[in-house]
Image (tube, grey):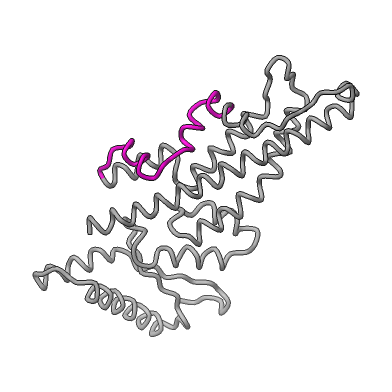
Amino acid sequence: MECKPSANLFFIRTKIDNDLENVKQERRKSLNTGELTNIVKQIKEDCLENLKKGGIKDPKVFVINSHKTETFEFHKLNVTLIKTVSDLKRDAMTLCIATLSEDILIKKVEVLSKRISKISNNAALRAAFSNRENNQNRELKILMNEAILYTRHFGVSTESLNLVAKKFRKDMSELKNTIHVQSAGILESETSFEKYYERFEEKYNSSIVDRIPVIGPQRKFRKVQRQSAAVLKSILNMCKSENQRLQTQIALWTNTHS
């Protein structure tokens, strides 16, 4: 194999669960934690040795189980990838990676937080020219779509939770109650989201200034901008907390089934 000296190469050793199962059958007994650790360590050392013999200097090897990403070095691989890519690609890669650890969670919060200002501005622009007297809240759709994006990136959307429930053979309602999911109820419909949005509404005293063509819309813009940002920050932190509780529960269930 020929490659540039500066190239970032990552070697992935998969199907570790098959190797461990084979060893277990050969020994005809269950493996304790120490034995499992030593076997995985030996597999990795064999990979490193073979790659060095093939001319690869300082190879980076990650031992993973694609079916149980919470085990072995899947998390380490994700963090390494994020650190290695350029700044332009880092945010996109961070959002593409499943939120399986606190490190990835923090990075996702950072990336999504940077979007709040832009999304709030767009929402405020729509609201500035909506007819509030006719209950027009044009900003709601923009904010709701962004909030739904949060649930998907943090793995707490209804679709994501349904996959977890099926994997561990749990009832969906039981899972939601266990990790105290609030975001699903808020984003269940436009009506439920609007009620949540109204909780952040600032007291706004109308005045004759609001009738001035330029100044009036500017006042409305700043008010809705602050309100929109507050709603997005709240739901972002909510999804973050839900993901933390979800990962804790997944770890407990994984240990129970192992």
Residue 35's x, y, as percent?
Answer: 22, 76
Residue nearest the observer in this picture, 145 or 247: 247
Asked if residue 135 is positioned above or below residue 163 in the image, the reply reads above
Asked if residue 181 is positioned above or below residue 73 in the image, the reply reads above
Instruction: Using residue 221 as the reference point, say whether residue 74 is left or right of it.
Output: left
Residue 171's x, y, as percent?
Answer: 28, 38
| Residue 131 is covered by the magenta coloring | no
Q: Return the residue found at the far left.
A: 28
| Residue 191 is covered by the magenta coloring | yes
Instruction: Using residue 247 as the reference point, say whether residue 16 is left or right of it.
Output: left
Q: Quadrant of residue 70?
A: bottom left
Residue visible at 59% across and 38% down in the picture: 146
Quadrant of the drawing holding the C terminus? bottom left
Q: Return the residue found at the far top.
A: 134
Residue nearest the observer in this picture, 160 or 217: 217
Numbered range of the magenta stretch? 169-194
Residue nearest the observer in this picture, 111 or 60: 111
Residue visible at 52% across and 44% down in the picture: 238
Q: Quadrant of residue 195?
A: top right
Counting the numbered discs, the total is: 0
Quadrant of the drawing holding the N terminus? bottom left
Residue visible at 17% across and 68% down in the picture: 22
Residue visible at 20% across and 72% down in the picture: 32
Dominant secondary structure (helix, strand or loop) of the stretch shown in magenta: helix
Residue 63's x, y, as percent?
Answer: 36, 69
Asked if residue 177 is positioned above or below residue 252 in the image, the reply reads above
